[in-house]
Image: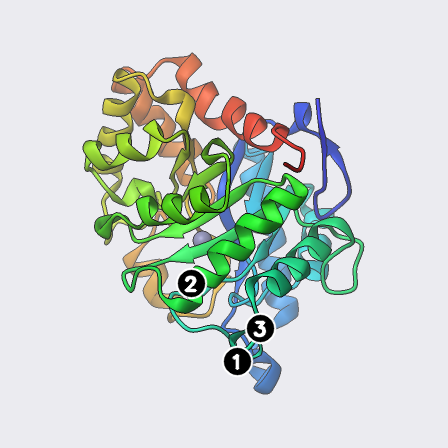
C-alpha cells in the first residue's frame, strides 16, 4: 500500500480500482481563453464535466488520470471542483506538452530549472494550490526528439528520479517515437519499468510494441474511440494478440478523451468520433476483449492491477 495524491486529497493505491490511465478533464489552447475569455463558457462546461464523470463512475470507472499539463491549459482548482462534485477520483499531472518548440521562457533555461518546477508541483502543489501532481507527462510526435522536446524529456526524467513519481508519455506510434523516448530516459538513468509509453495503441505493429515492453515499459493502449487513427476493432485485435503472447501485465487502457477539447468544433467531434468518451472501454471494449478470449484475470490486470503497480512503485533514486 502506498499513499498518492489526487485532486481531492491523498488516497491509498489499494483503493484506486478501475483506472483509466490517460484522459483529460479539459484541453484548452494555452493562452487563448486568457486573452479571449468570452470563448470559454465555464459554468456550462463545468456542469457538463460533472455529468460526464458522474456517468463514467456509474459505468464502473473509479479513477481517471488527467494528463493535462502546461501546453494543454491546465487548471487544477477547476479539476478539484469537478472531482468533488462528481465523486470521480482524479490524479493530476505535471510536465510540458509540446511537439517541437518550447515556450520562450524555457528556451534560454536548462532542463534542471524545468525539473525544479515539476518537482515543486509534485512536492508542494500546482498553481498555488495544495493539489500535488501524481505523474509526469511529456510528448514526442512526428517531428521526433527536437531540441525543445529533448529538454522536456530530460527534465521529466530528472524530476522522476528526484521524486519517484511515474512517467507517462504522448508518442507518435507510427514513427516509433516510444523507442526514442526510452533512449533518452535510459541516458538519464530512468528505470524504464516506471514509464508508460502512451498512444502505443495507435499501432498494430507487434514487433514495435514488443520492443517497448522488452525494455520494461508499460504501453498505453489509450486512444479508444479515435477511430480515424485506428478503429476499435483493430485496437481490440492488437490487445487480444498481445494478451495471447503473455503481455497483459504490461498494458494499460484508456481513451485520451476529455470533457471538452477546444482544438476542434465540438459538433464535428460528436459526429466524427461518437465513441470518444469515458464510457467506451467499460461499455464496448471490455465486452469485445472477453468475446475474443481475453480472460477476466487479464482484464483485471490491465484495468486495476497495472495502474496500482505503476503508482505503487515510489521512491527517488
Ligand atoms: Zn492525452
Disc 1 C-beta below 8 A from ligand 1 = no
Compared with residue 101, is residue 239 higher up or lower down, i.e. above or below? above
Q: Which mark is residue 257?
A: none
Query: What residue is at 41 percent from the left and 14 percent from the top?
Result: 296
Residue positioned 72% across, 60% down in the render: 77
In percent of width and height, residue 61 lies at 55, 34
Tag 2's secondary structure?
helix
SS class, disc 1? helix
Image position of 74 with respect to 63: above or below? below
CA gap, disc 3 to disc 1? 9 Å
Mark 1 surroundings within 10 Å by alpha-carbon count, few (fewer than 14), some (14 through 19), many (20 or more): few
Residue 216 in the figure: left or right of residue 132: left
Q: Disc 3 vs disc 1: Cβ atoms closer than 8 Å?
A: no
Depth check: give the residue in front, 271 or 2: 2
Instruction: Report the mark closest to the observer, 3 or 1.
Output: 3
Q: CA distance from mark 3 to mark 2?
A: 14 Å
Tag 2 residue: 149
Residue position marked by numbered label 3 in the rendering: 109
Q: Residue furthest bottom?
A: 35
Question: CB under 8 Å between callouts 3 and 2?
Answer: no
Q: Indicate the position of residue 135 as horizontal and vertical percent values.
A: 59, 45
How far is mark 2 from mark 1, CA to CA?
Answer: 13 Å
Give the answer, above or below, for where 303 lies relative to 275.
above
Amino acid at each position: 500500500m502506498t499513499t498518492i495524491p489526487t485532486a481531492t486529497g491523498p488516497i491509498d493505491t489499494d483503493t484506486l480500482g478501475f483506472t483509466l490511465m490517460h484522459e483529460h478533464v479539459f484541453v484548452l489552447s494555452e493562452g487563448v481563453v486568457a486573452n479571449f475569455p468570452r470563448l470559454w463558457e465555464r459554468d456550462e462546461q463545468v456542469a457538463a464535466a460533472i455529468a460526464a464523470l458522474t456517468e463514467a463512475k456509474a459505468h464502473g470507472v473509479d479513477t481517471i488520470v488527467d494528463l493535462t499539463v502546461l501546453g494543454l491549459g491546465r487548471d487544477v482548482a477547476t479539476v478539484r471542483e469537478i472531482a468533488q462534485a462528481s465523486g470521480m477520483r482524479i490524479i493530476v499531472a505535471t510536465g510540458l506538452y509540446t511537439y517541437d518548440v518550447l515556450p520562450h521562457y524555457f528556451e534560454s533555461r536548462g532542463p534542471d530549472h524545468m525539473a525544479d518546477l515539476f518537482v515543486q508541483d509534485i512536492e508542494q502543489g500546482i498553481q498555488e494550490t495544495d493539489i500535488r501532481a501524481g505523474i509526469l507527462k511529456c510528448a514526442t510526435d512526428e517531428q521526433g526528439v527536437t531540441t525543445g522536446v529533448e529538454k522536456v524529456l530530460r527534465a521529466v526524467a530528472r524530476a522522476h528520479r528526484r521524486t519517484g513519481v511515474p512517467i507517462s508519455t504522448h508518442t507518435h506510434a507510427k514513427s516509433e517515437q516510444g523507442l526514442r523516448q526510452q533512449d533518452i530516459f535510459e541516458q538519464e538513468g530512468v528505470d524504464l519499468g516506471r514509464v508508460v509509453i502512451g498512444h502505443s495503441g495507435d499501432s498494430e505493429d507487434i514487433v514495435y510494441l514488443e520492443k517497448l515492453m522488452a525494455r520494461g515499459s508499460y504501453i498505453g493502449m489509450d486512444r479508444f474511440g479515435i477511430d480515424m487513427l485506428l478503429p476499435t476493432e483493430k485496437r481490440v485485435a492488437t490487445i487480444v494478440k498481445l494478451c495471447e503472447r503473455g503481455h497483459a501485465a504490461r498494458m494499460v487502457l484508456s481513451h485520451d478523451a476529455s470533457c471538452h477539447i477546444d482544438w476542434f468544433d465540438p459538433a464535428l467531434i460528436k459526429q466524427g468520433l461518437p465513441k470518444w468518451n469515458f464510457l467506451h472501454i467499460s461499455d464496448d471494449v471490455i465486452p469485445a476483449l472477453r468475446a475474443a478470449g481475453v480472460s477476466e484475470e487479464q482484464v483485471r490486470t490491465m484495468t486495476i492491477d497495472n495502474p496500482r503497480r505503476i503508482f505503487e512503485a515510489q521512491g527517488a533514486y
